[in-house]
Image (cartoon, rainbow, N blue to C red):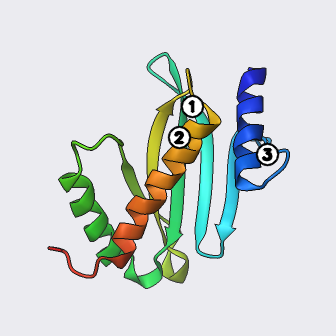
Amino acid sequence: MAWIDEMLAEFGSELGISGLSWNAHGVIRLEVDADQLLTIESVWRRDQQELLVSIGRRVGHDAGHRAQIALIRAHAARRATISLQLALGASGADTRLIVTTRLPLEGCTSQTLVDAVNRLNRWIDGVMIQEFLNA
């Protein structure tokens, strides 16, 4: 599993973070800014190890509206090349919209992670700028 650690260190270098590695719980959690978290976690699903890559963006009291927009966008993009899972975390002003994608660990590279993070960011940016449910 040393190659995974090397891949994560390379991914961290691309983000400008030296020595990026798993925490004691096997998770990477980065506070990108005050309103956004990036989380990477290794999980097993059906005999295959995967990386869960998540972006959590603070939506606060607008959570219900943003969640509706996110669900509509996810449904409309269900044939897209990226598979998404949506959730809300925390409560009140700290509520976050969390969007997650799964990557097979086998063959995963630092560039694969960078691409996944960029796609998630673009997707959640679209949710945040959309004002109306039918737009």
* Residue 48 point in image, percent of width and height: 50, 19
* Left or right of 125 on screen, residue 8: right
Q: Quadrant of residue 19?
A: top right
Q: Mark 1 = which residue?
A: 43
Classify residue 65 as left or right of residue 135: right
Quadrant including the C terminus: bottom left
Dot label at residue 20 = 3
- Residue shown at 23%/51% (left/top)? 77
Q: Position of residue 27 (x, y in %)?
A: 69, 43
Q: Do the residues labelled 2 and 1 touch (CB within 8 Å)?
A: yes
Type of amino acid at the residue the image marks with label 1: Val
In front: 55, or 113? 113
Q: Which quarter of the picture shows residue 128? A: bottom left
Quadrant in the picture for the N terminus = top right
| Spatial CA span between label 2 and label 1 | 7 Å
Residue beneath label 2, please?
Answer: 52
